[in-house]
Amino acid sequence: MGTNYYRIPSVREMGEKKSKLIEDIKNIAISSSSIIYKFKIIDDKSEQISYWDKFVEDTSIHLGKRSSGWKFLWNFNDNKYYSNKEELFNFIRTGRIVDEYGVEMDVEEFIKMALEWGQPDGLDGETYRRQHPRQYSHDFEKKEQYIDGLRVAPYTDFA
């Protein structure tokens, strides 16, 4: 059992997104085709997305997970928001941190906790595979990696 952590927008950032949503709604063209297509917009990838989907997009970014006995496991989200430790911490510091239960945490306390979690002798995938070769039944093609000293998952969906 572990705990997942998320970066959510600052109050200012959400206020800006809200203002944009209100402006978009004010500018909706009320036509038979917009009603039929449920007021969805076509983005540059030719995908339909609703104004609400646009509003909530990127409002809950999974940062990583802590689990007892393991080193903290970071989620780099396929480098969508950050690709190294400095960019990650800058990204974290522009928002707020909540755990999967909705409890908000001070950003600097989160960073400190994540860096110290499982140190110095917490497990990582390679150590676990060496210590428990028979119990480890998963043979992932991609193995976790270390980026700037951070243990990073090879996949994005592990919450």
Image: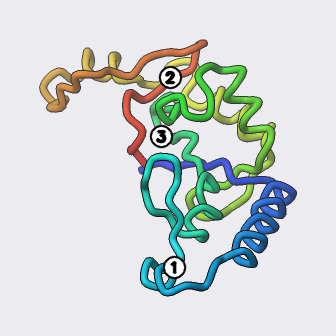
The image's mark for residue 151 is 2
Residue 126 lies in what quarter of the image? top left
Q: Mark 3 — residue? A: 68
Quick check: marks 3 and 1 in contact, CB under 8 Å? Answer: no
Residue 22: x and y in percent read 76, 74
Q: Is residue 97 above or below residue 73?
A: below
Residue 138: x and y in percent read 18, 31
Crowding near pointer 2: few (<14 within 10 Å), some, many (20+)? some
- Which residue is more in the foreground, 156 or 128? 156
Q: Residue at x 60, y 71 (%)?
A: 52
- Which residue is more in the foreground, 126 or 77? 77
The image's mark for residue 108 is none
Residue 36 lies in what quarter of the image? bottom left
As helix, strand or loop, the secondary structure at mark 2 comes to strand
As helix, strand or loop, the secondary structure at mark 3 comes to loop
Q: How many marks?
A: 3
Residue 2: x and y in percent read 47, 48
Q: Residue at x 73, y 57 (%)?
A: 104
* Dot 3 or dot 2, earlier in sequence: 3
Q: Residue at x 73, y 38 (%)?
A: 92
As helix, strand or loop, the secondary structure at mark 1 comes to helix
